[in-house]
Each structure stands twice: as structure tokens, then as C-alpha cells.
Image (spheres, rainbow, N blue to C red):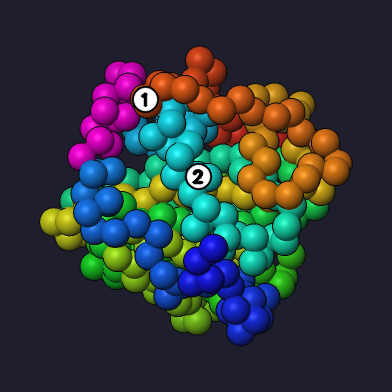
């Protein structure tokens, strides 16, 4: 066991107070990330006409390329430090901002979009590229997870990839922390933490894979997200609230269903 990927008590305390963690040891080396990025076009070519990279949701269910990342023991060790010994993985999605992209991600809380209770989930943001302020890296409001889930409203910001987001004035944007990650590094954040990201005016791509994990006590509302699948990562599933997913066997394949978008779920689920 590599203890570098076991969170210290200080790191756990920082996460509990602030709702996020960065400055963690890299999950993949530069050479490994180069290999993963070289394979990424094989995944992207499975997109259908009219689709974008944000439609790559839950493709870990059919592609070992993604599934193997989601269950990397180094990632799971870090997540276990937050969620405890029993947890499952249930979602993954790509967020890719090409050079000179005007797309932004408005301020929001992940938990608002997810038809799941109780709130006990962690998002991993794994950098496929070096990401920073210049190419539109994520920002987060420290401690905002302690305020509970806030109702989101439809946004008139046409450049935002989300149409449901928080209104300005509901929190202090000047307290935001700017993330900076090297390719192969990741961040962790609480499902209630307020976060977002600006456009990418640079000549550099900004690509990241998000992976969602939840404690086994968390239950999905199948009436909202009927294709939901849980992949037990550590421990035991003593609750058995959610249907279990099957491990994929192909390197690149897309699911035969269209995953429920986070906006569809957020518009339907009532808190």
C-alpha cells in the first residue's frame, strides 16, 4: 500500500472545513498521461453528429479506457479518506474546453442536479492537460458546502454549459480559490461546494474527467435517473439501495442509452 495516497488527518480536516482538496500527489505520470491522451481520440470518434464532449457521460459503463481510471486504487485511496470504507462510483463525464472557447461553467452545486439523498458524495476532477487561470480552470468557494443545497435558477448566460445555476449575490465570489493542476493530478470537492469555471481564451486545451463517488447509504431516485448504476469500489454495500453496474470488457464503446443530463435531473428532483 502506498501511503502517499492516504489522506492525513490535516487533509481531512481541511476538506471538512473548506469542501475541497488540491495539492495531492499525481495519479499518473507525464508518460502515462501522454498515452491516455493519445488514446482519447478513439473515444471522441464515438460521438454522433451534433454531440459534443459533454455528451460523454457514464461511458465508463462500456469503455475500459474510462472504467480503469475510475477504479484506479490511488484515486480510491484518496476518496476513501473522505467517504469512509464503503462507497461506490456512479458517474463520469468529460469537460473539455478547446482553445479560444467562450464556454463557461456557471456557479453551481453538484448536489442540486443529482436525484440522490443524503448528500454524501465526492467529485474527482482529473486533469488531462495542465489547467490554470489562463485556460479556464475551476474555481471554488471555500466553506460553501456548509450552507446546504441552494435552489438554482435558469440562467440567461448563453455561453454557460449549464442553464441552471446560482444567482450572483448569493455568495462572495471574491473568496473563490483558483485551482491549478498538472496533467495527471486531481482535485476533490464536496457535492454541495459552490464552484464554476471561466472561458478558455488561451491557445491551450483544457480537458478534465470528472468522476463521482458516493457513500453506500446514498440512494438514487430511479424515477428521475432510471439508468443509474453503482459500482462498489471499497467495502460492502450494506444498504443495496441502487442497481449494480456490470464491468465493461471493450476498450472503447458507448452506452446504448443516453444518460440523463444533470440539468434534466436538477429540473425534476425536488429538495
Q: Residue 92: where, in percent of width, then height?
A: 50, 41
Q: In this figure, which residue is indicated by the disc labeled 2?
A: 70
Q: Residue furthest left?
A: 203
Q: Residue 159: where, in percent of width, then height?
A: 36, 48
Mark 1–mark 2 distance (CA, rounded to whole Å): 15 Å
Image quadrant where one finds the N terminus = bottom right
Q: Residue 235: where, in percent of width, then height?
A: 73, 49
- In the image, taking residue 104 as reference, residue 231 lies left or right, namely right
Helix, strand or loop status at disc 2:
helix
Residue placed most toward the observer, 259 or 58: 58
Residue placed most toward the observer, 151 or 4: 4
Helix, strand or loop status at disc 1:
loop
Residue placed most toward the observer, 65 or 179: 65
Q: What stretch is highlighted in magenta?
A: 38-51
Image point (50%, 44%), residue name:
70
Query: Can you tell which mark lies on residue 105?
Result: none
Q: Compare marks 1 and 2 and give the one earlier in the sequence.
A: 2
- In the image, taking residue 158 as reference, residue 258 lies left or right, namely right
Cβ–Cβ under 8 Å for marks 1 and 2 = no
Q: Residue furthest right?
A: 239
Q: How crowded is mark 1: few (under 14 residues within 10 Å), some or many (20 or more)?
A: many
Residue placed most toward the observer, 32 or 271: 32
- Residue 182 vs 163, above or below: the answer is below
Q: Residue 198: where, in percent of width, then height?
A: 35, 61
- Residue 154 vs 193, above or below: the answer is above
Q: Residues within 10 Å of mark 2 (few under 14, many from 20)?
A: many
Image point (56%, 28%), residue name:
247
Query: Can you tell which mark lies on residue 252?
Result: 1
- Look at the image and tell me whether residue 117 can be seen: no
Q: Which residue lies furthest to the front in this view?
A: 1
The reply to whether the magenta stretch includes residue 16 is no
Amino acid at each position: 500500500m502506498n501511503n502517499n495516497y492516504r489522506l492525513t488527518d490535516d487533509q481531512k480536516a481541511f476538506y471538512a472545513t473548506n469542501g475541497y482538496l488540491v495539492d495531492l500527489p499525481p495519479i499518473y505520470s507525464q508518460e502515462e498521461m501522454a498515452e491516455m491522451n493519445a488514446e482519447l481520440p478513439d473515444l471522441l470518434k464515438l460521438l454522433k453528429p451534433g454531440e459534443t464532449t459533454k455528451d460523454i457521460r457514464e461511458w465508463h459503463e462500456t469503455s475500459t479506457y474510462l472504467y480503469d481510471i475510475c477504479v484506479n486504487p490511488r484515486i480510491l485511496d484518496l476518496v476513501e479518506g473522505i467517504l469512509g470504507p464503503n462507497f461506490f462510483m456512479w458517474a463520469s463525464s468529460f469537460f473539455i474546453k478547446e482553445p479560444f472557447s467562450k464556454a463557461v461553467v456557471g456557479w453551481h452545486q453538484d448536489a442540486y442536479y443529482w436525484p440522490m439523498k443524503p448528500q454524501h458524495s465526492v467529485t474527482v476532477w482529473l486533469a488531462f492537460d495542465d489547467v490554470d487561470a489562463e485556460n479556464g480552470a475551476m474555481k471554488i468557494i471555500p466553506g460553501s458546502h456548509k450552507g446546504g443545497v441552494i435552489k438554482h435558477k435558469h440562467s440567461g448566460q448563453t455561453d454557460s454549459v449549464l442553464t441552471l445555476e446560482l444567482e450572483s449575490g448569493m455568495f462572495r465570489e471574491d473568496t473563490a480559490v483558483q485551482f491549478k493542476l498538472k496533467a495527471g493530478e486531481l482535485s476533490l470537492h464536496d457535492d454541495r461546494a459552490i464552484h464554476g469555471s471561466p472561458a478558455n481564451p488561451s491557445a491551450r486545451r483544457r480537458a478534465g474527467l470528472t468522476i463521482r463517488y458516493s457513500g453506500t447509504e446514498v440512494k438514487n431516485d430511479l424515477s428521475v435517473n432510471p439508468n443509474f448504476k453503482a459500482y462498489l469500489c471499497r467495502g460492502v454495500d450494506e444498504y443495496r439501495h441502487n442497481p449494480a453496474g456490470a464491468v465493461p470488457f471493450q476498450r472503447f464503446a458507448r452506452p446504448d442509452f443516453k444518460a440523463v443530463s444533470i440539468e434534466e435531473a436538477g429540473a425534476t428532483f425536488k429538495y
